[in-house]
């Protein structure tokens, strides 16, 4: 899943596209809901299936105008983790069974700070494709845009993903060593050593990495829960193979990080639950170079090794580090991980507010 944020624009509570005529189009959509527990604020967002086009957004739990004037969209939660989703005459339980109901399949993530729901809905009859007036459309229904709120944010139109380089830059033959004579007539051999440097400003971006840190647990309707007590180390990653010396490249990042201490997810229902750790990473462009080392007079850069590539390193910024999230209907087994390449926000770790 991909995110983008902006400062809040709290004007109209209901915003959807206005239809110039009664023509309709049938399409698959992604419905996303978020509830912020501290403020009580909510959002309801509808994107096309590819998450490339915004169809509607409301800062309430319903959308009844514009594209949904003929088939109102409503979310009714009887508890923070259970309820119903209605589109027109169709009503299904949420999060509902993993295989979905009437083709509508939902997943849910929740923390102490928020609950978010995502549902894929097929064959929705929308009033036809009107133009969007972005001046009337709030980018977010929430005031704060720090890491925790971005993590739980309503879905936005995804920014382009970082292009993945599939080449394997295995190390070629290193340059030859050479000898120098110091002022006191000593002979020193300068040896080649490979290092990684930032390319320009690194073109930094913020990305998420999800790691499942518990086993899947199928709940049978009674109270159930999963616990996590074992800390694991997560290393930096790159989008190429080969021998890659790590570099912070001047950013507040680390070579590795821990998934943290104990935590627990509780639930009551007939679904599969698990716990994930979400790590915010900075992605930046780097290049390997050969350097000569060995003493005074040796320290100079020689040739490039391979081409430039992207390095992902976990943030050490205290406001953009990592977070636990409980999952319903979105479990993949203990140890599963996914480095998401869709850009959450442009910039290094310091783009997050310092509070």
Image (tube, rainbow, N blue to C red):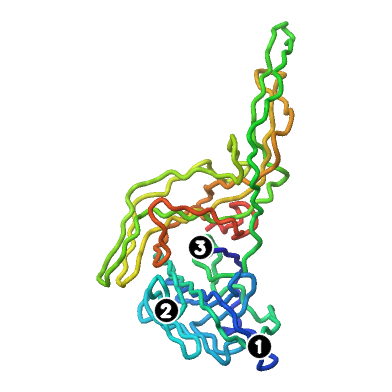
- Secondary structure at numbered mark 3: helix
Within 10 angstroms of label 3, few (less than 14), some, or many (20 or more) residues?
Answer: many
Give the number of the mark in front: 2 or 1: 2
- Secondary structure at numbered mark 2: loop
State the CA–CA distance, disc 2 to disc 1: 29 Å
Within 10 angstroms of label 2, few (less than 14), some, or many (20 or more) residues?
Answer: some
Within 10 angstroms of label 1, few (less than 14), some, or many (20 or more) residues?
Answer: some
Name which of mark 2 and mark 3 comes first in the sequence.
2
Q: Residue at x 45, y 57 (%)?
A: 323
User: Which image quarter: residue 84?
Assistant: bottom left
> Which residue in the protein does label 2 denote?
101
Q: Is residue 56 above or below residue 330?
A: below
The image quadrant where one finds the N terminus is: bottom right
Give residue 24's position: percent from left, percent from top. 63, 89
- Secondary structure at numbered mark 1: loop
Q: Residue at x 58, y 79 (%)?
A: 57
Give residue 160's position: percent from left, percent from top. 66, 61
Q: Tag on residue 18? A: 1
> Which residue in the protein does label 3 denote?
151
């Amino acid at each position: 899943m991909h995110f983008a944020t902006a400062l809040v624009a709290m004007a109209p509570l209901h915003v959807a596209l206005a239809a110039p005529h009664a023509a309709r189009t049938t399409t698959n959509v992604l419905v996303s809901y978020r509830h912020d527990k501290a403020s009580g604020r909510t959002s309801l967002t509808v994107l096309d299936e590819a998450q490339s086009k915004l169809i509607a957004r409301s800062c309430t739990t319903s959308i009844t105008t514009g594209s949904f004037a003929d088939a109102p969209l409503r979310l009714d939660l009887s508890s923070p983790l259970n309820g119903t989703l209605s589109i027109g005459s169709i009503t299904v339980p949420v999060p509902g069974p993993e295989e979905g109901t009437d083709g509508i399949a939902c997943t849910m993530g929740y923390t102490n700070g928020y609950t978010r729901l995502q549902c894929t809905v097929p064959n929705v009859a929308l009033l036809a494709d009107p133009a969007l007036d972005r001046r009337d459309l709030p980018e977010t229904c929430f005031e704060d845009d720090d890491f925790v709120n971005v993590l739980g944010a309503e879905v936005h139109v995804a920014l382009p993903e970082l292009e993945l380089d599939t080449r394997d830059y295995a190390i070629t033959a290193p340059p030859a060593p050479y000898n120098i004579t110091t002022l006191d007539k000593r002979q020193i051999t300068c040896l080649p050593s490979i290092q990684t440097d930032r390319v320009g400003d690194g073109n930094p971006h913020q990305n998420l990495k999800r790691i499942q840190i518990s086993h899947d647990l199928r709940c049978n309707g009674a109270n159930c829960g999963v616990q996590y007590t074992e800390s694991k180390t997560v290393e930096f990653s790159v989008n190429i193979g080969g021998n890659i010396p790590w570099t912070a490249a001047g950013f507040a990042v680390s070579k590795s990080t821990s998934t943290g201490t104990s935590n627990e997810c509780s639930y009551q229902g007939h679904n599969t639950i698990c716990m994930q750790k979400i790590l915010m990473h900075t992605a930046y462009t780097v290049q390997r170079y050969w350097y000569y080392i060995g003493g005074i007079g040796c320290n100079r850069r020689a040739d490039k090794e391979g081409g430039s590539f992207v390095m992902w390193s976990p943030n050490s910024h205290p406001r953009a580090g990592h977070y636990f999230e409980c999952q319903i209907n979105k479990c993949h087994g203990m140890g599963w991980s996914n480095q998401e390449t869709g850009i959450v926000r442009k910039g290094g770790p310091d783009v997050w507010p310092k509070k």
